[in-house]
Amino acid sequence: MSEPNSEALSTPLSVKHNGQPARRPRLRGVGVVGLGYWGPNHVRNLYDLRCAEQVYVCDLDSKRREHMHQLYPGVIALSDFDELLANPDIEGVIVATPVSQHFPMARAALRAGKSALVEKPLATSRSQALELIKLARETGSVLMVGHTFEYSAPVRKIKQLLDGGALGDVFYISSTRANLGLFQRDVNVAWDLATHDISIINMLMGRAPLAVSCQGQSHYRDRTEDVALLTLDFGNSVVAFIHVSWLDPNKIRRTTIVGSRQMLVYDDTSTQEKIRIYDKGVNVLPYYDTYGQFQFSYRYGDIQIPRIEEAEPLKLECEDFVRCVGERAVPLTDGLNGLRVVSVLEAANQSLRSEGRPIPVQTEEDADA
Ligand SMILES: NC(=O)c1ccc[n+]([C@@H]2O[C@H](COP(=O)([O-])OP(=O)(O)OC[C@H]3O[C@@H](n4cnc5c(N)ncnc54)[C@H](O)[C@@H]3O)[C@@H](O)[C@H]2O)c1
């Protein structure tokens, strides 16, 4: 398989480098398992993209299957996941079931020779994620994780700005993702919501943190934290804070990046102005004779709001999956990307159970050993 298309970070995924629209492969069949809250968004995008001759959907719940059939009369609806896997026309499977089912379903799909796009997080442990990566390599299938924000235009714009040095050196990143609900049954709030922030921050930093500490509390169910605070240590005084909550009166989706040159605020709830770049900072006066003269000067410059060409991130994600299955290419959010996030979450869980002690994050090099 070829390497992930790094150009995809800075150019729309459906456009090739020469400016010509990419030829979008059409698959014989794609299946979506899990038609609860999120799965139907995958079905809609697969339908809109017309990327498969046949879209199959699967859910244990007959009401969910009927609902999908009403919306998209052309889909073939199944109740049994094994039946989906036994169909030789289905080349790729999207797993949008509860988190605890990601690993067994993705493993079964890969074993059946299908490619798999697994909703976030890829699995519930590093060892599971590693097993999926190994299996995908052995079967020559595509393994991808649904880190949707890595396909979003604002996040890709921020990556461009950071890589171009617009903010200078990153001092810290602070991210809040909070709202009231939706409580997940099988994972805590970190595995549910912080997954997005970790994937975004890993992408922006170009690497996973060295260590993580995490504190949290459960107010409704034992050992299922509904509020958590994670600290990601990237070394060299670079730190990221992530606050996630299912118990907040307001919906907040805000990331602040403070750099040595400029500061940036990304508010995903804003419809028009998701990114603001503040030409603000601190200058240390180079000369002073006494402690009393020691002072900083603060810079209050202009605020820039870059224009962002929005496209639905999930559409780009589905498009990348279909393209990679058709061309046997490596998607932007491949299995290793999924492993990096799961490694941080696993360390965060360990920290939660040991009163917030920093836990080293295992690296990919550890995985290859
Ligand atoms: N990328 C994103 O932005 C995003 C957003 C929301 C949810 N998600 C992810 O999507 C996944 C699903 O979340 P949700 O909120 O839609 O959950 P949900 O509980 O609303 O839906 C899950 C569905 O899976 C079905 N299901 C469970 N076991 C099954 C089985 N063995 N065979 C067939 N169907 C089965 C259930 O009947 C249900 O309809 C989760 O992994 C979640 O993390 C991702």
Image (tube, rainbow, N blue to C red):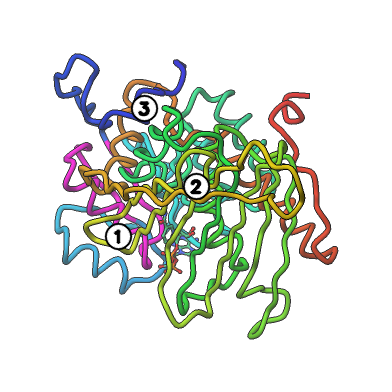
Secondary structure type for disc 3: helix
x 77%, y 30%: residue = 366
Q: What residue type is disc 3 on?
A: Cys
What residue would you read off at disc 2? 281
Instruction: Look at the image and tell me in which quarter the C terminus lies.
Output: top right
Distance from label 3 to label 2 (Cα)? 43 Å
What residue would you read off at disc 3? 324
Q: Can you tell which mark lies on residue 40?
A: 1
Nearer the N terminus, badge 1 or badge 2?
A: 1
Residue 307, image x and y in percent? 21, 44
- Picture quadrant where residue 64 is located: bottom left
Q: What residue type is disc 1 on?
A: Pro
Residue 14, image x and y in percent? 22, 30
* Residue contact at pointers 3 and 2, CB within 8 angstroms: no
**Disc 1 versus disc 2: nearer the observer:** 2
Residue 311, image x and y in percent? 22, 45
- Nearest the eye: 349 or 275: 275
x 71%, y 52%: residue = 346
Q: What residue type is disc 2 on?
A: Gly
Magenta stretch bounds: 29-57
Residue 178 falls inside the magenta stretch: no
**Is residue 144 toward the left or the right of residue 153 in the image?**
right
Residue 30 falls inside the magenta stretch: yes
Q: Residues within 10 Å of mark 2 (few under 14, many from 20)?
A: some
Residue 133, image x and y in percent? 60, 32
x 54%, y 71%: residue = 184
